[in-house]
Image (cartoon, rainbow, N blue to C red):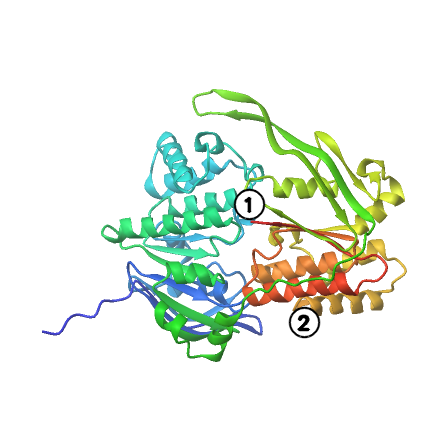
Amino acid sequence: MTQAVRAPLLSIEDLLVRFGDTLAVDGVNLEIHAGERVALVGESGSGKSVTALSILRLVRDAELSGAIRFAGEDLVAKSERDMRGLRGSDIAMIFQEPMTALNSLYTVGDQIGETIQLHDGASPCEARKRAIALLERTGITEPQWRVDSYPHQLSGGQRQRVMIAMALACRPHLLLADEPTTTLDVTIRAQIVELLLELQRDEAEKRGMAVLLITHDLNLVRRFAEHVAVMEKDVLVENGTTDAIFTSPQHPYTQRLLASKPKRVVLPVLPIALTLLDAKDVSVDFPTRLSGFSGWFRHGNFKAVDDVTLMVRQGETLGIVGESGSGKSTLAMALLGLQRVSTGAVQFQGRPLGDFRGREKTVLRLNLQVVFQDPFSSLSPRQTVERIVGEGLALHRPELDAQARHARVVAVLREVGLDRTALTRYPHEFSGGQCQRIAIARALVLEPSILILDELTSALDVSIQTQVLSLLADIQKNTISDTCSLVTTYR
């Protein structure tokens, strides 16, 4: 007796995605069956995220052709009203950039609860209880308090966990996870992977939940996925079981991708150099007042940074290591003078940051540059890349004419792996990794004395990590007058 062939839960057939004359996805074919865990792998800009967003028809200003069949129905042909009914219930997505995806005007509990009320018809009280339980399951401490927090009050890792909780709220049949662990430290990353595995296994009998994981983290792929699809330059070049892809990759690109590993760049030892940045006994406190559902509240201070002392000399690289929520980013903002310190002091070249005024403060800003953790939030959506990268030059280097500024912008974009075609495009047209490279270029274009990097490689694939780290090392080696120093945070 011939066994019936099981129909796939999701079938992508000859998918093409165009933005005007630009082809972003070229003829992708992919199947996902109920209960399967599939990883879509490739470098930044390869078309991974566009493919995933196309499943939910969330690609703005794009022309789609081909077919995307979910449970036998073609999503490309569905109305927008029908798609709204599918999004968040039958198909849910964990977005790559939580600060962009979360609404800054509502608490995280309200945002999780809205999904539960909309799709499950739960009461506000029941939705709140489920939101707290989901926050707890995704590893957020004190969920009964954090449920009333706004996105800006949470660390990057905590915001990503909120996004995961929101996506899982209605127990979807298909979960699209776009770089779900990018902003998480290694401890929480392992916890989230185990959580996704646990949820997928628990729902296998009931709903057969499948997961499509979009990532550049090959260690995560090997641990999580059963099948792997590899994309290069908008094309799906290889597809197979995880064991087959990792042990016997067939396509040259897959072979190069698996062989890519970030390398530690060793700089020459410098003689005693000028102290550029000096922080002494720095503490940062935030006042807290969190209201609960029953009306209770709590007053007090939350100590984000506690009595930190550090020094950065000319040409040095200082790494600040810690888990999500440990205070790394808050300390980085204090070193920049963008966060008020409660006690202690930060000095640049022997002067407290608060003493800089007028023109001196402008020069200070030129010498202290930063690359933020979340590139989407730090890049203006209304400006082209040339305007974003060149804006600092127009302010700090008025002696340069428009032609000289243009040449400098093109040169620094090339240094971070982007060509001149990026100049007239906007941030939403780039992948997360590409946006991070734009943010790095914006900081490097001014040739600062100190570059503060908040998780600069977290959104980059391994080959670009190597390129960016080598680039920063070259900058330190080749700068003659004001040798650039780096302060960087890591998980």
Q: Where does the image place residue 357, in percent across and percent down from the top left?
A: 87, 39
Quadrant occupied by the N terminus: bottom left
Q: Is residue 388 above or below residue 125?
A: below
Q: Where does the image place residue 155, in percent across and percent down from the top left?
A: 56, 41
Query: Identity of the amino acid at label 1?
Result: Gly
Q: Kindly identify the residue that appears in the image at 32 percent across and 52 percent down.
A: 200
Q: Nearer the viewer, residue 116 or 309?
A: 309
Q: Where does the image place residue 50, in percent across and percent down from the top left?
A: 49, 64
Left or right placement of residue 259 versus residue 2 in this view = right
Secondary structure found at label 1: helix
Q: Where does the image place residue 424, in percent across and percent down from the top left?
A: 69, 66
Q: Quadrant of residue 279?
A: top right
Looking at the rendered structure, which numbered label has been put on residue 413? none
Crowd around label 1: few <14 · some 14–19 · many ≥20 (10 Å): many
Q: Is residue 70 above or below residue 23?
A: above
Is any atom of residue 244 visible in this view?
yes
Left or right placement of residue 432 versus residue 250 in this view = right
Query: Identity of the amino acid at label 2?
Result: Asp
Q: Kindly identify the residue that appears in the image at 43 percent across and 21 percent down.
A: 294
Secondary structure found at label 2: loop
Is any atom of residue 12 visible in this view?
no
Residue for badge 1: 156
Q: Is residue 114 above or below residue 64?
A: above
Q: Kindly identify the residue that appears in the image at 74 percent across and 31 percent down.
A: 344
Q: Nearer the viewer, residue 301 or 476?
A: 476
Mark-to-mark CA distance, 1 and 2: 30 Å
Residue for badge 2: 419
Crowd around label 2: few <14 · some 14–19 · many ≥20 (10 Å): few
Return the residue found at the far left: 1
